[in-house]
Image (spheres, rainbow, N blue to C red):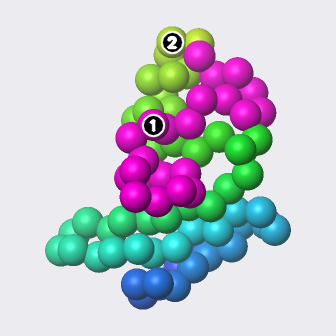
């Protein structure tokens, strides 16, 4: 596992298409903003596992975690 330190408003690139930005830090909670193309599914781990159990993963462009912050146009993960 790669471990990186970031501060608010700093980002991490994954490949050429995925950007993860630290949006907010409050106590032990960190809010992330994730920008990724629609063909890359983005889910919180517990949502991903539930989708897998239900057999709803449909490969590229599969369902996204719909509990993302509605104020942000990028896909979200908590």
Residue reaching furthest to the left: 27
N-terminal-most mark, 1 or 2? 2
Kindly identify the residue that appears in the image at 42 percent across and 87 percent down: 7
Q: Give the residues in magenta.
A: 56-78
Can you identify the residue that label 1 sits on? 66
Can you identify the residue that label 2 sits on? 54
Q: 2 left or right of 48?
A: right
Q: Residue 17, position in %: x, y?
A: 77, 63
Q: Main secondary structure of the magenta part?
A: loop
Front-most of residues 14 and 61: 61
Q: 32 left or right of 25?
A: right
Contact (Cβ within 8 Å) of mark 1 with mark 2: no
Q: Residue 60, position in %: x, y?
A: 77, 33
Is 59 part of what is drawn in magenta? yes
Residue 14 placement: quadrant: bottom right
Compared with 29, 63 (above or below) is: above
Q: 13 left or right of 15?
A: left
């Amino acid at each position: 596992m790669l471990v990186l330190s970031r501060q608010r408003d700093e980002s991490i690139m994954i490949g050429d298409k995925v950007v993860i930005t630290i949006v907010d830090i409050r106590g032990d909670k960190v809010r992330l903003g994730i920008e990724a193309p629609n063909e890359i599914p983005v889910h919180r781990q517990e949502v991903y596992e539930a989708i897998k159990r239900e057999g709803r993963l449909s490969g590229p462009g599969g369902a996204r975690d719909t509990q993302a912050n509605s104020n942000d146009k990028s896909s979200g993960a908590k």
